[in-house]
Structures are given as C-alpha cells and as structure tokens.
C-alpha cells in the first residue's frame, strides 16, 4: 500500500466538522465539475479533426490538433471502474464462455465468480481458487491477466472491493477487523474447498484470517495460501515509505490525508483516504516516466501508430482509475503494519484475540518475494512466524522486481503456469501421484513441489 509519497496534503485546522482535514476533496470535485464543459468541447473538436471526411484530418496540423485535444481530455478525465472484458477462455482446447456473477456481497465488497459454461465436464479437475485483490486504491481489474491465466485450469473467484465514496454513511465503517471477517465469511461460503491467492497488500489479513480460523479449529480452512509480495514484516529492507510511517506516526496521517466525501456522492460525509491523493503518490514516484509516456502518445497519434496508442490507453485506463479507501481501514492498516509491525511481533489482534501464525498447521503455504531492493521482500519473514509444521509444507519463490500493485499483477501473470503445482486437485496436503515426476516415492510429493518451486525462473519484469 502506498502511503505518504505525495509529501502531505494541507494540514487540518480542526479535529472534527465538515471541513476536517482541509477542503482538498471539495476543491477536487469542484475542479472536475468546472472542467466538464472544456472536456466536452475538446472531445467534440477532436472528433472533427479525426473525421476522414474533413480534409484537415490528413494533414500534420489536423493530426496534431486531434492528438493534443485527446491528451487534454485524458489528462483531465476522472476514470471510472474498468470492465473485466473476459468473455471466454480455453479449457482443454475448447473455447468456453465465461459469465461473471456475484455470489456474496457486503457493503464494501463483492465476491465475483468467473463461471465457465461447459458443454461437457472437463477431464481434468478444476481446483477452486480465491484471488484476494488489493484494497489499496486501484480496482481489481488490474489482475485481469492473472484471472485469465488461471481460468483454463481453475474455478476462479475474486474479491471486488467497493469505492468507499459510493457507500452511504448509514452502512457503518470498515476497518482491518472487518476485512478479516469478510475473508473468513468468503471461505465459509466456498465451503473451505478453496485455495487462496493474496496479491500484495491482502497478505496480512489473509494470513491473519487463516491463523484465526486455525486457532478456532475451523473445519473450513483453505487448502493452501499463496502470499505474493505482501507487507508481512516491513522492517525487512525498509524503504522511505516505511520510514515516513514510523517517523510521522498515525496522528500525522489522520490529520493530513483523511478527508470527508463531498456532495453529491452516495458516501457524503464519510471519512476516507481519497483516491486522487493515492494517485498523486503513484504518479509522483515516477513522474518523468509518465511525462515521457504521454509525450510518446502524442507522437504515436500524429504518426497514426494506432497499436502503440491503444496500448497506452489500455494501461492508463487501468492505472488512473482509483477508488477511495475507508479511513478506519487505512489508518488501522498503517498503524498495524507500518508503524507497530504488530504481526511479526506477535501483537496483532482481531476482535481482541491475538493472531498467532504458529497455529497454522493444516494450510500449505507458498510465498513470492521481490528480488530487487526497490521495494522490500516483505514476505520473507514467514519462516520466523510460521510453525515448524507449516514450514515443512511451505515453499518460496523469488519473483518480480517490484511488488507494487501494478507489478504484482504482472508478476502473477508470469507466475501462473509455475504456481499450478501448488494448487492440486482438491487439497494441497496431498499431490496426486500422476502430477509427481516418474519414480517419485509416495508421500514425497510435497518435497517435490518445494524443489520444483525453487527452480522456477523469475518472470520478466514489467516494462
């Protein structure tokens, strides 16, 4: 989860009231409304200069005008939630339609099922997989490639977190404890016959939820969990983000980045960490790269390089679509994960009950870490917080270069074919003999899986 990269918003002058934390969000809404006529005009003029019936559309002047107006419209647009655009997949060499349906819903989250409409039952077993998408400012459609990679061989479910500004205040708050409750409820709905894949930020609540279920002897614990680039212990290779959280403290974040949702959004007066501040942080971290990308887009449009321009549009339609986070959840996560390091210290609690990862004994574990120091290899301390029983049934993979939300998606896409041995037919505790190499002894399947996982080649980093 990105925190504080933007250097701080205007400090609050009061501790409560409608103008708490400064009027940044109100000014942002006003600026968006004020720019609507200009965007509409720019879009209309762009269509004029792109019309093939217009002789100017074939000139350098006309192409430059159309390109400049498109850049203006895209730079000032408020991007909505992208569509999944997954209509079909290939299973066993046959194209199978895919229908997306919500099978579980709460005010702040929906559980989506990518239901494949088979004409004939597939020959190979299809393990049930729950992908827990990050609740860190972007929409879960960033993991579209991950879902597409798993669909041919898995029954895929994914969490779709709701933009906090769209949730009325009457629905109550949402914090880290609620997050863990949601995950436990989802696993119960799926009957426990599921493997869980946590991409980046949700590694902490997933580990906490599984530990809590194990401590309660819950019969519906998942078969396995994969933690990809998660902030289990941010003391490992700390970055400027971690240092900022520790030095400023939770009160600084409460004063400087929390504001109230303005009218006329459904979540009017709800305390949130606004998405535009999150986006400001993302962009400012690599500002030169984003400026260069938009400069290239202008030249691609002038040169009629439609393929390169479309790739730019597809990436930034996802990257610039952000959502607000509930203030309670954001502040509790910063305090628990980045300030107090409660989980690796054994001090994290859920509803007043201490989370003990050493209780995890029935759930197989696979961790994916970063291989460069741009971001810390946050999941590495799992050997210190997992029990000996879990460690014997665990594996480790050092993967992509930057486990941010964006690159975690790329990492997962490259990791999909290599992760299949971690998701056997029905239970990760026993790998079918048919999946083991020739000559393998019965009972050695877990050792084979661990050895094979260590031989994985790192996927190519995002370019």
Image (cartoon, rainbow, N blue to C red):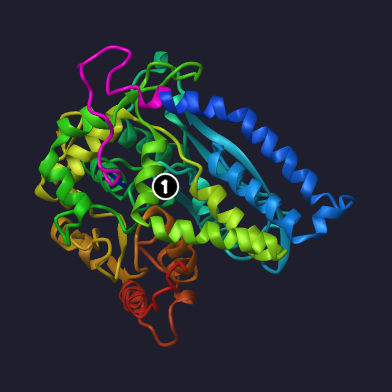
- 431 in the magenta segment: no
Q: Which residues are magenta?
A: 4-26
Q: Position of residue 74 (x, y in %)?
A: 59, 45
> What secondary structure is the stretch in magenta mostly built from?
loop
Q: Say if residue 136 shows up in the picture.
A: no
For label 1, the residue is: 132
Q: Image quarter for residue 412? A: bottom left
Residue at position x 73%, y 45% from top?
A: 46
Q: Is residue 197 left or right of residue 335?
A: right
Q: What is the secondary structure assignment of the residue under circle 1?
A: strand
Q: Image quarter for residue 137? A: top left
Count the marks: how many?
1
Q: Can you name the residue that lies furthest to the front here?
A: 61
Residue 428, compared with residue 129, is above or below; it is below
Q: Is residue 143 left or right of residue 401?
A: right
Q: Position of residue 38 (x, y in %)?
A: 63, 32
Residue 87, compared with residue 335, is above or below; it is below
């Amino acid at each position: 989860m990105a925190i504080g990269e933007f250097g701080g918003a205007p400090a609050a002058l009061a501790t409560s009231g409608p103008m708490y934390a400064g009027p940044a969000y109100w000014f942002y809404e006003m600026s968006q409304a004020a720019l609507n006529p200009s965007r509409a005009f720019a879009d209309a003029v762009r269509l004029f200069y792109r019309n093939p019936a217009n002789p100017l559309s074939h000139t350098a002047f006309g192409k430059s005008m159309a390109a400049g107006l498109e850049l203006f419209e895209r730079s000032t647009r408020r991007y909505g939630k992208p569509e999944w655009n997954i209509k079909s997949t290939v299973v066993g060499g046959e194209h199978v339609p895919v229908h997306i349906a919500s099978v579980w819903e709460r005010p702040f989250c929906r559980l989506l099922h990518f239901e494949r409409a088979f004409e004939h039952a597939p020959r190979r077993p299809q393990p049930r997989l729950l992908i827990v998408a990050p609740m860190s400012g972007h929409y879960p459609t960033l993991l579209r490639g991950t879902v597409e990679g798993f669909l041919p061989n898995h029954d895929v479910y994914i969490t779709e977190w709701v933009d906090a500004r769209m949730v009325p205040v009457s629905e109550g708050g949402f914090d880290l404890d609620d997050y863990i409750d949601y995950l436990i409820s989802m696993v119960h709905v799926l009957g426990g016959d599921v493997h869980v894949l946590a991409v980046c930020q949700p590694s902490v609540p997933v580990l906490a939820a599984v530990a809590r279920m194990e401590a309660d002897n819950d019969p519906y614990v998942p078969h396995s969990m994969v933690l990809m680039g998660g902030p289990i212990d941010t003391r490992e290779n700390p970055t400027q983000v971690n240092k900022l959280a520790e030095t400023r403290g939770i009160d600084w974040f409460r004063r400087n980045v929390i504001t109230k949702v303005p009218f006329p959004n459904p979540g009017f007066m709800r305390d949130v960490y606004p998405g535009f501040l999150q986006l400001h942080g993302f962009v400012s971290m690599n500002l030169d790269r984003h400026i260069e990308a938009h400069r290239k887009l202008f030249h691609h449009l002038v040169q009629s390089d439609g393929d390169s321009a479309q790739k730019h549009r597809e990436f930034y339609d996802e990257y610039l679509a952000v959502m607000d986070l509930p203030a309670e959840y954001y502040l509790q996560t910063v305090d628990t994960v980045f300030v107090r390091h409660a989980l690796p210290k054994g001090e994290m609690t859920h509803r007043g009950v201490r989370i003990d990862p050493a209780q995890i004994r029935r759930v197989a574990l696979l961790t994916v870490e970063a291989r460069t120091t741009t971001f810390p290899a946050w999941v590495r301390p799992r050997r210190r917080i997992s029990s000996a029983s879990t460690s014997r049934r665990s594996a480790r993979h050092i993967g992509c270069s930057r486990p941010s939300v964006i690159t975690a998606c790329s990492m997962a896409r490259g990791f999909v074919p290599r992760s299949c041995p971690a998701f056997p037919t029905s239970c990760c505790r026993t790998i079918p003999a048919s999946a083991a190499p020739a000559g393998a002894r019965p009972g050695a399947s877990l050792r084979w899986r661990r050895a094979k996982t260590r031989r994985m080649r790192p996927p190519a980093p995002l370019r």
